[in-house]
């Protein structure tokens, strides 16, 4: 049985068309990526542009892209948002510090010298996130009332810490697992006790991961609305509530809302940008040598 | 400097599974370079870690310098270990890496710096490398820093866990002799684990061969090569490995490739005692002497002639390895000849073998039959 040998040109042709198909496939995905990206970005762009418009110009349809920018709405926002930003900052930073204080030892106990029932512990932590917060708001309100913590910034700090703790434990634990066992054994042989082991061997390796976990917690705490809305009024009202207040019953002040939203987004976007880089670095820490 | 003793030391990982290290009895003399060698899973690394204190003992005990250290913390055993992957602290400089153990022992900074510098000099590590971080060093440099970290502690025992396995072949050969020389100079008892029998043979004062958690034989390299105590050691030590062929017992000897290899009286007595009908013969490749084409057995000589067909010729330069299929269903063997004697696959060849170069092993237990 003899096979008819393909001529050189015949072999070349399918090879060329296969490559062209590959490239056009790649081009198609790239185009799709751009379309989706721009699609997500356009509303944000509109919001930022609208923030610079006076209220009258903001409500036109189709939206104007050329206009003379003004800072009047920003001035209004800045005059009103002082306390809100302050409360958000305290709640976010406070809860993140509390999370780190609790999550680092927990992650250590679940990663480096695991306790016997570490799987059960991990599952328990993640299971707390499975409960819809709407179901818990009733009991939470009652507890807050009885402990006189309603409308208190401390309440938000505690609740945000509880909200973010499972995530922080999971993330920091996975970074701690990256520390090579041999290194810990070498430290043990060198005479390092538990504290030294943590401070001198584990922390330097794990710091980028801890930082990115903390930044993720910051983002979630900053944007949290439901708890703040139901458990605070004025003394602990956070930035998301300020945004809500820009949507009054009487009408839509779009420019004001856009300005407030832009101001509220800026810290989170900066934090997200920083977190993105250290997140990639932390997650690609797999290689040891 | 201290002698080390394993006394019936055992380690079992999970109840019901065979022990990783099975009642190991091993005495290492003061200042000796002892190599633990064996295939993967033989228990050599576990035995080392038991000595280090990183694995607990499930039975028996371990003594360093006459003192029972079975329950002593690793840092109090006065040992130092070089890990396979070096385990250097990435955030510390080379000097800090090497001085870390001393810092834990609260040694004064000046003394620490002096000892670090001395060790660096001993290992040919440039002064300027001391302030660099591990990731800026080459593999060979990192390996030397790992050794420096151990040397600086001036321990009683050095433990090394396959320290050369991550180096390229050329560097490995170079570093091998450097380590052996260093140990000779420092005179510190060293326990060295490797799976490479060449490393074991070239570096060790004595070599302990392990398999399946059990010690097979512990002797000098020469003794292991010339007098293996069982089939495993015979086949493991020596490269290319000893040819092992099952041969049926006949009058006066064993039949292989149509010839009869005479066996010594004690061997025959041992075979009869165990009611054996066949034994395993072992012949080293260099003991199969290639005969000139056309030559035949000379009258009066006691050498055995084996014939076969060449399957493959591997040229090594100075030597050549011939893969030969022996006649009469004798199986495949490897013979070593001078590189310049030309032969080719398909040719018929004959080998002279001296009966005293042939080893006999029990077909079931693998023990050497020597009466």
Image (cartoon, coloured by chain):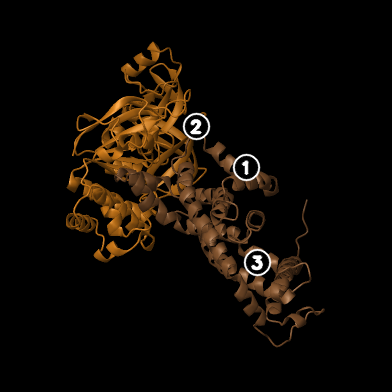
> Mark 1 sits on what residue?
A127
Q: Left or right: B237 with respect to A220?
A: left
Q: Left or right: A61 with respect to B44?
A: right
Chain letter of mark 3 equals A
- Quadrant hosting residue B360: top left
Q: Quadrant of the C terminus of chain B?
A: top left
Nearest-to-viewer mark from 3 and 2: 3
How far from the left and from the top, in percent, is residue A276? 56, 64
Marks 3 and 1 on same chain: yes
Q: Are the residues tagged 3 and 2 within 8 Å (C-beta)?
A: no
Q: Nearer the viewer, residue A190 or B62?
A: A190
Circle number at residue B260: none
How crowded pointer 1 is (Cα within 10 Å; few <14, some 14-19, many 20+) is rated as: few
Q: Secondary structure at mark 2?
A: loop
How far from the left and from the top, in percent, is residue A26? 71, 67
C-alpha gap between disc 2 and disc 1: 64 Å
Can you see residue A215?
no
Circle number at residue A242: 3
C-alpha gap between disc 3 and disc 2: 88 Å
> Mark 2 sits on what residue?
B331
Sequence-earlier tag: 3 or 1: 1
How crowded pointer 2 is (Cα within 10 Å; few <14, some 14-19, many 20+) is rated as: some
How far from the left and from the top, in percent, is residue B352? 37, 34
Chain letter of mark 1 equals A
How crowded pointer 3 is (Cα within 10 Å; few <14, some 14-19, many 20+) is rated as: many
Nearest-to-viewer mark from 2 and 1: 1
Residue shown at 48% from the left, 55% from the top:
A97
Q: Quadrant of the N terminus of chain B?
A: top left
Q: Left or right: A182 with respect to B178?
A: right
């Amino acid at each position: 049985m003899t096979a008819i040998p393909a001529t050189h040109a015949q072999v070349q042709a399918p090879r060329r068309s296969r490559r062209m198909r590959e490239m056009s496939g790649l081009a198609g995905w790239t185009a799709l990526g751009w379309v989706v990206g721009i699609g997500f970005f356009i509303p944000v762009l509109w919001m930022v542009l609208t923030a610079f418009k006076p209220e009258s110009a903001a409500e036109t349809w189709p939206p104007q892209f050329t206009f003379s920018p003004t800072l009047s709405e920003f001035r209004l926002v800045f005059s009103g948002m002082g306390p809100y930003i302050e409360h958000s900052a305290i709640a976010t930073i406070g809860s993140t510090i509390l999370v780190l204080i609790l999550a680092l030892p927990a992650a250590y106990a679940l990663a480096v010298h695991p306790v016997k029932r570490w799987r059960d512990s991990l599952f328990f932590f993640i299971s707390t996130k499975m409960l819809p917060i709407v179901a818990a708001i009733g009991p939470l309100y009652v507890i807050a009332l009885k402990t006189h913590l309603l409308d208190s910034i401390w309440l938000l700090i505690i609740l945000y810490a509880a909200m973010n703790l499972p995530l922080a434990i999971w993330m920091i634990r996975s970074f701690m697992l990256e520390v090579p066992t041999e290194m810990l054994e070498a430290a043990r042989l060198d005479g390092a006790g538990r504290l030294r082991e943590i401070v001198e061997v584990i922390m330097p390796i794990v710091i980028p991961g801890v930082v990115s976990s903390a930044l993720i917690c910051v983002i979630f705490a900053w944007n949290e609305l439901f708890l703040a809305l139901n458990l605070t009024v004025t003394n602990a009202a956070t930035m998301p509530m300020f945004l809500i207040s820009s949507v009054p019953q009487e009408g839509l002040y779009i420019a004001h809302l856009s300005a407030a939203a832009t101001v509220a987004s800026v810290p989170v976007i900066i934090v997200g940008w920083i977190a993105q880089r250290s997140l990639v670095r932390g997650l690609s820490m797999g290689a040891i040598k | 400097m201290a002698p080390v003793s394993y006394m019936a030391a055992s380690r079992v990982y999970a109840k019901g599974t065979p022990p990783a290290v099975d009642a190991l009895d091993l005495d290492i003399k003061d200042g000796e370079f002892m190599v633990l060698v064996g295939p993967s899973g033989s228990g050599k690394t576990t035995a080392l870690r038991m000595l280090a204190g990183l694995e607990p003992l499930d039975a028996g005990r371990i003594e360093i310098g006459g003192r029972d250290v079975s329950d002593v913390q690793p840092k109090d055993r006065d040992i130092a270990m070089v890990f396979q992957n070096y385990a250097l602290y990435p955030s510390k400089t080379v000097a800090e890496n090497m001085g870390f153990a001393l810092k834990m022992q609260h040694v004064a900074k000046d003394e620490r710096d002096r000892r670090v510098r001395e060790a660096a000099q001993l290992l040919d590590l440039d002064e300027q490398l001391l302030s660099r971080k591990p990731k800026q060093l080459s593999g060979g440099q990192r390996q030397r820093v790992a050794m420096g970290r151990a040397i600086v502690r001036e321990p009683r025992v050095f433990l090394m866990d396959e320290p050369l396995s991550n180096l390229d072949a050329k560097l490995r050969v170079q570093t091998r002799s450097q380590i052996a020389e260093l140990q000779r100079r420092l005179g510190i008892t060293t326990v060295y684990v490797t799976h490479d029998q060449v490393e074991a043979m070239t570096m060790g004062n004595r070599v302990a061969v392990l398999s399946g958690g059990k010690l097979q034989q512990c002797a000098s390299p020469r003794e292991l090569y010339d007098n293996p105590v069982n089939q495993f050691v015979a086949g493991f030590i020596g490269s290319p490995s000893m040819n092992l062929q099952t041969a049926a017992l006949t009058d006066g000897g064993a039949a292989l490739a149509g010839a009869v290899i005479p066996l010594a009286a004690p061997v025959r007595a041992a075979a009869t005692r165990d009611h054996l009908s066949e034994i395993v013969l072992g012949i080293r490749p260099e003991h199969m002497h290639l005969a000139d084409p056309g030559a035949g057995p000379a009258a009066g000589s006691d050498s055995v002639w084996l014939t076969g067909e060449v399957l493959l010729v591997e040229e090594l330069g100075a030597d050549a390895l011939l893969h030969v299929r022996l006649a009469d269903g004798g199986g495949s063997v490897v013979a070593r000849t001078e590189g310049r004697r030309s032969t080719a696959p398909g040719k018929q060849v004959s080998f002279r073998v001296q009966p005293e170069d042939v080893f006999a092993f029990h077909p079931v237990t693998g023990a050497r039959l020597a009466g």
